[in-house]
Amino acid sequence: MSSLPKLPPLPLSPAAKAWLPIRLLLAVGASVGVAFLLVLVLYITDLGLSVWDRLQQRGPAFWIIYLLLLTGMSAGGAYGVWRVLRWGRPASKSRSKAPAKPPDEATLRERLERHSAAGVPVDLIHRELDELQRRRAAGEIVVSVFGEISAGKSSLIRALLPGTEIAVDVRGGTTREVNYYTWTSSAGDRLILADLPGLNEADGSLDQLARDEALRAHVVLYVCEGDLTRDQYAALRTLIDLGCPLIVALNKMDRYTDRELNLVRERLAERIGEQLEVAPVQCGGFEEVTRIYHDGREETTRRERQPRVEELRRTLQRYLDNDQQVLDALRDTAVFVLAQQKLDAAVAQHRHEKADAIVQSYSRKAVFGALAAVSPGTDILIQGYLGFNLIKELCALYEAPAREVDMQRFLDLAGNQIKRNMNLLLALVGNIFKAFPGIGTVVGGMMHAVVYGLIFESLGKAVARSLDSRGELANGPALRMFEDNLSEDLEARAKRLAQLVWSRQQDGDHAGAAPG
């Protein structure tokens, strides 16, 4: 058997020859690194054994101190490593802000005076505080009966006040306004029962009336049947967040066994997030009774169901037996929060309307300024004072501090966006002006005037939205809103401004042609 022929070695490529010294250096470096690690391991091992021999010669007291020292150093080192790893990360969601402090009467009245001087309508809030003063002076304890339509609110009041004429309708929605009834509890406490309109009527027009009156009460009786719906849960959550003393009156208790009532209580506590006072009641009403005679005949009649409200009376009395000043303080705080919410809504509405008027005013100034310019240019927004004053007035309206350098910086950034969109805007406005016959050579200035109107309108709305939502002029979000506003409903806005410019130009031509 013949041997295989010996093959010649393969020649190295130029690239492989160039990498050969580097590979040799890497091999030498790896060998030195391995040797260093072996020496380090041997040194640490020798040091550990030496320390162990010395520790064995010490007493128990030294061992305890030494172990405590090692534990403390290890815990401190672990905490330091954790802080380094956490550094720069956003705060955890679980670390939420502390709840806002409830408003007090002095602060609320100071805000009322300040916003009233600024033109905000505050008569409704003044009436809210005046009603609170009246109830304080009268020393009334108000218990509001609250809940959805057909839950049995009026029937419950009739059960608490036998002989009182109260309209009850199975179709629901009988109560169209707040009705007040005087009731003396078994302990002699004189109460005012407020029968509120039911929530979630067909048009929902009375929902806010009912919620507001519930917040004015010392104690709220929330009437429901069985488990809560989403709307009932939201209504209860609002009352609980404001600190209103609350009793859930679970109507039609004859439907439930004791075990089922306990399950309902657990379910309510689970959905609300805290334990609630639940008092099962039977508000009365009518029931059908079938009588079977000895000859097999059956007769069905309707009879009035006997009301059962004893547990509710006892639960309510426990609230009333507490300190009257505590109930008054809880009621006052709820009313102050209600007044503050109404004031915030009035301020927001006023600012929205005033901001729109400011933006439209400066948009017209920009249009007329461009028409009056001899040679209008794209720097009218950046170098002129109109844009600066527009932002300054909006910041003053929203009570948002803004430095002049920050406002100018925002205008500079907005100017860059304008340059990118100027040709597109001019082309669009030029096409719109084609619908106006007889414009002639003045179309260039008129086109610029419309474009400047669009720019100021879009810019002002973006700044107002930023101030309203963030309380400050945030460059990034405001610039994004500005760019979005430039293209929003662009054709309709351009036509409206073009009509304004055309009318202004026509008025000027007629004035120039009139005899002197």
Image (cartoon, rainbow, N blue to C red):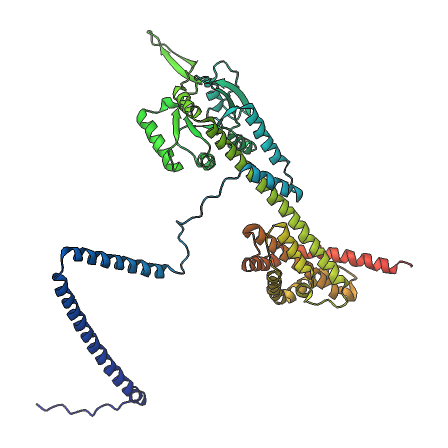
Left/right placement of residue 271 relative to residue 352 reads left
Q: Residue furthest left?
A: 1
Q: Residue furthest right?
A: 516
Which residue sits at x=51%, y=22%?
A: 192
Quadrant containing the C terminus is bottom right
Left/right placement of residue 176 relative to residue 82 reads right
Left/right placement of residue 437 relative to residue 1 reads right
Please provide percent x and percent y for residue 86. 36, 59
Please provide percent x and percent y for residue 503. 78, 55
Q: Is residue 225 above or below residue 272?
A: above
Quadrant for residue 492, please give it: bottom right
Does the rendering let one see residue 101?
yes
Please count the marks in the image.
Answer: 0
Which residue sits at x=57%, y=60%?
A: 479
Which residue sits at x=58%, y=27%?
A: 134
State the residue in front, 406 or 468.
Answer: 406
Which residue sits at x=54%, y=36%?
A: 336
Please provide percent x and percent y for residue 5. 15, 92
